[in-house]
Image (spheres, rainbow, N blue to C red):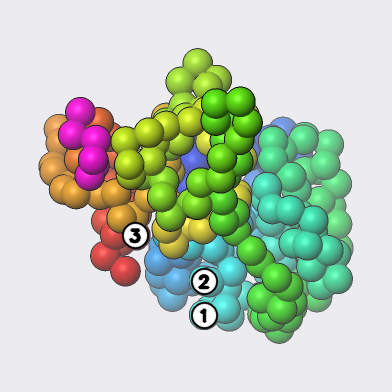
Amino acid sequence: MDVLIIEDEKRNYNRLKRLLEEIDYAFRIIGPVTSVAEIVDYFAHNEMPDLILADIRLTDGLSFDAFSRVAVHAPVIFTTAYDEYAVRAFKYNGIDYLLKPIDAEELAAAVTKARKRKSEATNDNLSRLLEQMLRHDNRYRERFLLPYRDGYKTVLVGDVNHIYSENKNTCLYLNDGTSGIVSLSLETLETQLNPDKFFRANRQYILHIDSVEYIGNYFNSKLIVHLKHYPRAKVVVSRDKATAFKNWMNR
């Protein structure tokens, strides 16, 4: 059985691969496919796999963006950190989903279910899922409430220059030079912020697209990003994410 994994985080891919091999060592694991562009290219040049495991949020958009452009005739199990409306959409369309971090038993049950329903997982199913999701009010975070003096102040997401996390502390750095602590992880913020405007550059940084002043080439095919208003901040983008970052900036 050929299983295609669509996942842009190497650590998550390795875990999925290991769990799938524990379910059935005979599985032929394909991937990882890491972006919307790679999904479209894969289906243009390769045979249809027997099963697809697809992360929803990729570095250059949503996997739904790709599925709406290609004919997919295989069961799809989505791995997701999406909120409840997305879960209802999956249930309505009869497509399995797994919430991260992936549980081994839940994955095994989803694979069994997907095997049984292979003939039902057509491109039409995915088209209806996409339509269902777009019909819902897919709102991203618009503001933050930050402690300020003896109370709180609101900050619009458009005023955020970048977000930095270290030692489990997450800090918003604003375009006016001020900053504030939020009690949210970068992983949680990724699901709340519009991916057209924000990019997870590495384990410590999320960048606003308007904060980027200059992108330089770095050793080993990495990139180094210089930020407006924060000249001392030098954000390194890994080789694995470099292409997706440039595509994000060039849209």
Sequence-wise, the earlier of marks 3 and 2 is 2
Instruction: Please give the label number shown on residue 146.
Output: none
Quarter residue 73 falls in: bottom right
At 16% from the left and 48% from the top, the residue drawn is 214
Q: Residues within 10 Å of mark 2 (few under 14, many from 20)?
A: some
Contact? badges 2 and 1 (CB < 8 Å): yes
Question: Residue 66: which numbered mark, if any?
Answer: 2
Question: Chief secondary structure of the magenta span?
Answer: strand
Span of residues in magenta? 227-232
Which residue type does callout 3 highlight?
A: Trp
Mark nearest the camera among 3 and 2 is 3
The percent position of residue 116, horizontal first and vertical second, equals 86, 63
Task: Work out whether residue 148 or residue 94 is closer to the camera in this orientation and state it.
Answer: 148
The answer to which of marks 3 and 1 sits earlier in the sequence is 1
Of residues 236 and 152, the one nearer the viewer is: 152
Residue beneath label 1, please? 69
- Tell me the quarter of the picture where residue 14 sits: top right
Query: Mark 3 and mark 1: span between their CA atoms?
Result: 19 Å
